[in-house]
Image (cartoon, rainbow, N blue to C red):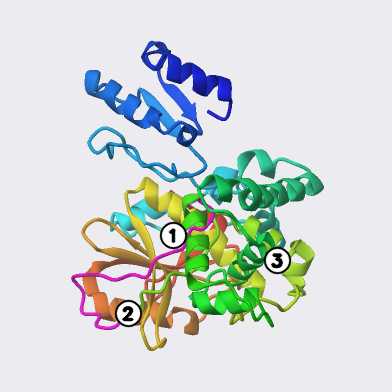
């Protein structure tokens, strides 16, 4: 629906959707929001499944008159996971862990730290990752520029100071895999500025960038049936693809590996590569969890004494807990929060693992799995 002529055809002859061969793929459907209701009525007349696929790069600015409940299933499409990129053959199934089967943890990977860094900056967007490095950088930069210059206004929000929005995005990228407050992100985006954007402006930034599928924060885990009394609700910040965060920060593979990215933006507890590796793993886990009908959260106690990077929760609120470590080796210190969580949850903790950059997948004597990121799959 990017093509005005195609939109005009649909307006003039809506029944052409029914006459087309099945399945019908309608890309950028949000540019003609009436399509939603046309599809809904068509499904009412013929409820056979998989007749239509609606894809879009943003939410519609005008909500459809009907939610589509009972007729249309909504799924978020994310960039390619490591398994989909086929950099290694996965030997550990997250679905098996979520099912409570405590699968055998085996396999070896020859994926190096440098290769993980290359995958971080290389992007999971299929058409972009195949490009030469210079063209890839230009495409990612163009994607970000298009959001600021075209997509943002098309969502009904004029950007009075595009440079501030771009700076806010860079500050958000610097906060990747942290729970930094939005006021801290704004301060990092506008150091020394007297005329800072109002809170309503930065709230609009977040709302619109989420509607454009650019922000993909991980919500805090707030279980309703456990004995936890005080858990932090603040989200962990992530962009849809860590390659976008790297472009906003000007980080390529050499700078990630030697941690020479300029020290600007939100303060983080470790090297930028660690945050970006966690973001890459988070992307992968979300893809695999969605396939298993599970949701992904993070855990942090209000006092900050305990935190677990990723909580994968199935419908009955039983969970798999995952820690992400940039190092190849796992120590007792690295699993202490997983032990704490196991003591608190008992049988509600189905499995636990540390996702690493190492070579071998195995179970420790304490039952905690150690899995190289390249060996984890759906």
Task: Identify the disc placed on residue 259.
Answer: none
Q: For the view shown, which residue lies furthest in the right direction?
A: 134
Q: Which residue is mark 1?
A: 105
Q: Earlier in the sequence, mark 2 or mark 1?
A: 1
Q: Which residue is mark 2?
A: 231
**Residue 222 painted magenta:** yes
Q: Residue at x 50, y 74 (%)?
A: 182
Q: Residue at x 52, y 67 (%)?
A: 202
Asked if residue 17 can be seen in this view, the reply is: yes
- Relative to 348, 103 lies left or right: right
Residue 165: give x, y in percent of width and height. Answer: 62, 63
**Residue 52 painted magenta:** no
Above or below, 269 relative to 287: below
Q: Nearer the viewer, residue 15 or 249?
A: 15
Residue 319: give x, y in percent of width and height. Answer: 30, 64
Q: Secondary structure at mark 1?
A: loop
């Amino acid at each position: 629906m990017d093509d005005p002529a195609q939109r005009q055809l649909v307006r003039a002859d809506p029944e052409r959707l029914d006459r087309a061969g099945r399945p019908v793929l309608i890309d950028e459907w949000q540019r003609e929001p009436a399509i939603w209701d046309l599809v809904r009525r068509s499904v009412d007349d013929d409820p056979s499944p998989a007749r239509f696929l609606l894809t879009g790069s943003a939410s519609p600015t005008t909500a459809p008159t009907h939610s589509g409940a009972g007729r249309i299933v909504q799924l978020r499409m994310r960039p390619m996971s490591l398994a989909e990129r086929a950099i290694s053959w996965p030997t550990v199934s997250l679905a098996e862990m979520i099912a409570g089967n405590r699968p055998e943890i085996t396999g070896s990977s020859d994926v190096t730290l440098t290769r993980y860094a290359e995958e971080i900056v290389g992007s999971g967007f299929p058409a972009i990752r195949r490009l030469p490095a210079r063209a890839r950088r230009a495409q990612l930069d163009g994607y970000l520029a298009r959001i600021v210059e075209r997509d943002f206004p098309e969502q009904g929000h004029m950007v009075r100071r595009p440079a501030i929005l771009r700076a806010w995005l860079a500050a958000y990228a610097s906060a990747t895999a942290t729970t930094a407050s939005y006021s801290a992100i704004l301060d990092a985006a506008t150091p020394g500025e007297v005329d800072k954007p109002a809170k309503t402006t930065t709230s609009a930034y977040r709302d619109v960038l989420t509607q454009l599928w650019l922000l993909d924060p991980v919500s805090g885990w707030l279980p309703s049936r456990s004995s936890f009394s005080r858990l932090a609700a603040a989200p962990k910040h992530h962009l849809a693809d860590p390659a976008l965060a790297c472009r906003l920060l000007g980080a390529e593979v050499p700078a990630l590996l030697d941690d020479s990215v300029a020290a600007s933006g939100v303060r983080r507890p470790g090297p930028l590569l660690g945050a970006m590796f966690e973001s890459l793993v988070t992307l992968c886990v979300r893809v695999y969890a969605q396939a298993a009908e599970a949701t992904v959260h993070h855990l942090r106690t209000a006092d900050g004494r305990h935190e677990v990077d990723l909580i994968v929760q199935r419908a009955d609120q039983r969970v798999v807990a995952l820690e992400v470590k940039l190092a190849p080796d796992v120590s007792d210190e690295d699993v202490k929060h997983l032990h704490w969580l196991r003591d608190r949850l008992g049988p509600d903790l189905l499995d636990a693992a540390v996702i690493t950059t190492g070579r071998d997948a195995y179970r420790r004597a304490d039952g905690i799995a150690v899995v190289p990121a390249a060996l984890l799959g759906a």
